[in-house]
Image (cartoon, helix red, strand yellow):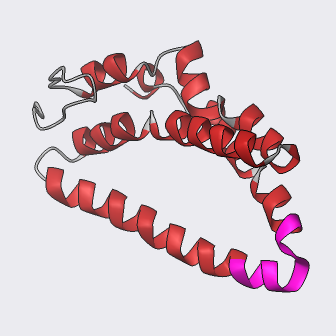
Amino acid sequence: TRNAAFAPPVGEKVATVEEALRVAGAGGARELFNLGGGDVFALAMPYAGLTLTVILSILVGLILSSAFTAIVVFAQELMPGRVGMVAGIFFGFSFGVGGLAAAGLGILADHQGIDYVFRMVSYLPLLGLLTILLPRMDELR
């Protein structure tokens, strides 16, 4: 089943998850960069000045979000008849977890201080490196 509803930022229409991953650049070393490339910038943020922190925040956000569309399309390929439901679950879960995490980090900042939370959160993008442990698609087929 083909999903033609995905349009990457470059405007190129893709129809399958393979094409989405190709357009999003999720192959080999580039995949690792999409998932873990922002780690260096995130780790530097607590020690940077205000202007550099803003620049690093933009870079980390762009890098981390670059793989999101390919991940959503991949999930939609797993459930071809439920494209809208899959997208809704992904976005709902993302915003829900983000809201809960913001509240939890706020409580932690009240108790430990904002500097502690800022340093701790800079390590979170390293969790993306755990995806190396996931099986490759060709191994699953």
Q: Residue at x 67, y 79 (%)?
A: 104
Q: Position of residue 88 (x, y in %)?
A: 25, 62
Residue 131 in view here: no
Location of residue 111 (image quadrant): bottom right
Q: In x, y percent, where is residue 65?
A: 47, 40
Can residue 75 be seen in the rendering of this structure?
yes
Residue 75 point in image, percent of width and height: 31, 44
On whether residue 44 falls in the magenta region, the answer is no
Image quadrant holding the N terminus, namely: top left
Question: For residue 119, what is the image quadrant?
Answer: bottom right
Residue 108, magenta (yes or no): yes
State the residue at coordinates (75%, 58%).
Answer: 121
Q: Position of residue 15 (x, y in %)?
A: 14, 25
Instruction: Indicate the quadrant containing the C terminus: top left, top right, bottom left or bottom right.
Output: top left
Residue drawn at 79 percent across, 79 percent down: 108
Q: In the drawing, does residue 96 fall left or right of residue 38?
A: left
- Left or right: 34 as drawn, with respect to 106: left
Which is the main secondary structure of the residues drawn in magenta?
helix
Task: From this view, report whether residue 101 is shown above or below residue 72.
Answer: below
Per the rendered image, the range of residues in magenta is 106-115
Which of the pair 121/114 is nearer the observer? 114
From the viewer's side, name the closer residue of 82 and 36: 36
Query: How many numbered tags mark residues here?
Result: 0
